[in-house]
Image (spheres, helix red, strand yellow):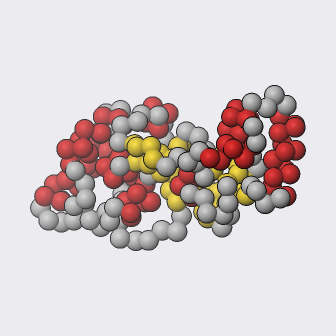
């Protein structure tokens, strides 16, 4: 098996661990040398230590969730894409097990720590194209969970039944429940 055969999958980004497990190589040092050879021959594009792409046209959302695992795309990235926020962000915002900012290949990734039970709950998170991404309702709740006073530009994309269905994920957080209710009332009264 050629090491590049693993890129026939739909993924655009792979980690050393992915390659090690897929290739069946028993010697990590030998695999590192092979990967180094493929990088020198421009068959692999190195992104970070132990993370590679097929080429420079990789999926940045996929990379974001491969740098820190478990994680999913959320917060301002999803809210802007769904027109809840009108501001354009160049950063990619990610829910993760730790808070940190990383710049990789000219792109800034902002990771926000979520409690383990929230982060690993799959409700309102879908898997697509090699990464996980929050629904607009889950991203809305993630923002409320992590920011006490946050302004939303347009709440019409939200399905309020789904918002209330997802709210228990956050462990009965009374502040969140109150904030969600205030936003919902404001939306019903035409304030947002």
In the picture provided, is 113 more to the left or to the right than 168?
right
In the picture provided, is 137 more to the left or to the right than 56?
left
- Residue 152: in sight, yes or no? no
Residue 104: quarter of image: bottom right
- Residue 165: in sight, yes or no? yes
Q: Position of residue 138 (x, y in %)?
A: 35, 46
Q: Residue furthest bottom?
A: 87
Q: Residue furthest left?
A: 189
Q: Looking at the image, is 31 positioned above or below residue 37?
A: above
Q: Position of residue 35 (x, y in %)?
A: 81, 47
Q: Looking at the image, is 108 positioned above or below residue 68?
A: below
Q: Residue furthest top?
A: 26
Q: Residue at x 67, y 42 (%)?
A: 6
The one of 62 and 72 positioned closer to us in this rendering: 62
The one of 186 and 34 positioned closer to us in this rendering: 34
The one of 176 and 52 positioned closer to us in this rendering: 52
Residue 121: quarter of image: top left
């Amino acid at each position: 098996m050629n090491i590049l055969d693993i890129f026939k999958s739909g993924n655009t980004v792979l980690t050393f661990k992915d390659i090690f497990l897929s290739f069946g190589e028993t010697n990590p040092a030998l695999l590192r040398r092979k990967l180094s050879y493929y990088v020198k021959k421009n068959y692999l594009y190195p992104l970070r230590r132990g993370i590679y792409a097929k080429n420079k046209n990789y999926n940045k959302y996929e990379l974001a969730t491969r740098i820190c695992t478990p994680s999913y795309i959320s917060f301002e990235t999803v809210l802007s894409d769904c027109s809840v926020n009108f501001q354009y962000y160049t950063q990619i915002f990610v829910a993760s097990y730790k808070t940190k900012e990383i710049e990789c290949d000219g792109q800034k990734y902002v990771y926000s720590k979520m409690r383990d039970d929230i982060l690993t709950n799959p409700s309102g998170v879908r898997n697509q194209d090699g990464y996980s991404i929050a629904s607009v309702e889950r991203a809305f709740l993630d923002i409320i969970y992590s920011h006490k006073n946050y302004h939303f530009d347009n709440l019409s994309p939200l399905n309020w039944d789904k918002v209330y269905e997802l709210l228990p994920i956050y462990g009965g957080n009374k502040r969140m429940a109150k904030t969600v209710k205030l936003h919902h009332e404001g939306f019903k009264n035409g304030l947002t």
